[in-house]
Image (cartoon, helix red, strand yellow):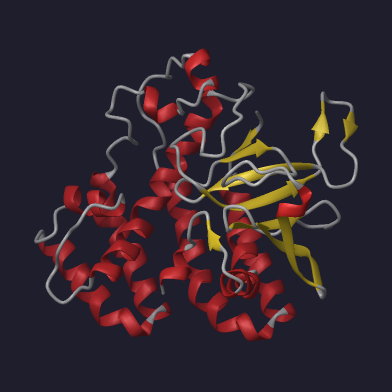
Amino acid sequence: MQTTAVETPAALRNIETALSRASTDIPALTPLLTAFGPLLAARARLREAAPGWTGPALVIDAERFGQGAFVLAQTEVGGGFEDMSAHLTGAARTLLPIMEQSFPAIAAELKLLGAAIASGALTPKALASAGFGDAAAVPGVSEQTMAFAASELVRPFVERQAQDLAAQVKGLPWPQTCCPVCGGAPNMSVLRRVQEDGEFLQAHGGRRFLRCSSCSTEWTHKRVSCPGCGCEEPDELLVLRDPARVHERADACKRCKAFVLCLDSGELAEVPDPDVAALTMLPLEIQAKQQGFAPLAEHPWSSL
């Protein structure tokens, strides 16, 4: 298995470049890019400053890992990421004002959420739990807004820890379709030309990487295979494309009715940030859903 981790300073520059290019290439998506762009950039800055995995290096049982026991299933911290609650109040001060400006429809709710965090009415522990899907109530804040905001607040710290954890299993075989670090489902895939054994670049098309919807870890997987059910029958696999943007597609499976977005970067001079690339593929996401397919995992903007 090959895994990749985001190098944050370069990632921040990549985000800004990809947003600028996408706004020029797809003017119709400018409102979406304008809304999520500042949030993606701010998250990247927080990720750069985040502490990462602070505990000792993990002892991974390679046999269990090869059988599907992802990294966090083998830790002694309850099968989850390390507690990042101490950092969330500061993250809220940074991200919530950006989100209020980017998403005016829920700005009032986000302001109430920020006030609850600042006053201690919503504790950092409860906020962290909400970021991982547990219920948390703040008067005037809908369940949907709470889930969206809390998940965005914990994400920079989750992604930073995942970078360290992915390094613990680099090179170990991982044939599963769930994330090797946290067990999350993929919401994106990327085809990359990679160098094999320090000698030659792979042929056209390259290697397929799935990208975790929870922690953004990437891992290699079979190119012609449904990540949902494992189907490898060509007649059951469907590729949806926009002829004007041939490097973007949605890989759908007729058997299980699932799909995952895919960026084919093999012929691109500059590979865009995967989150920005996924934003630009919203029309394909909508097309796949209209044809009866469901995403393996949602993107943050899908709930909005």
Q: Tell me where residue 99 appears, x and y as whole percent.
A: 38, 72
Q: Tell me where residue 31 appears, x and y as whole percent.
A: 54, 83
Quarter placement of the C terminus: bottom left
Quarter placement of the N terminus: top right
Quadrant in which residue 121 is drawn: bottom left
Frontmost residue, 80 versus 13: 80
Frontmost residue, 242 versus 231: 231
Q: Residue at x 56, y 70 (%)?
A: 289
Q: Tell me where residue 51 appears, x and y as whole percent.
A: 39, 38
Q: Residue at x 49, y 77 (%)?
A: 35
Q: Residue at x 60, y 58 (%)?
A: 259
Above or below, comparing residue 117 to residue 4 in the picture? below
Q: For the image shown, how many numbered marks are present on the structure?
A: 0
Instruction: Locate residue 36 relative to residue 130 in the image: left or right.
Output: right
Frontmost residue, 250 versus 160: 250
Above or below, comparing residue 181 to residue 94 in the picture? above
Above or below, comparing residue 33 to residue 81 in the picture? below
Above or below, comparing residue 135 to residue 4 in the picture? below
Q: Tell me where residue 251 appears, x and y as whole percent.
A: 68, 57
Q: Residue at x 79, y 38 (%)?
A: 194
Frontmost residue, 77 versus 92: 77
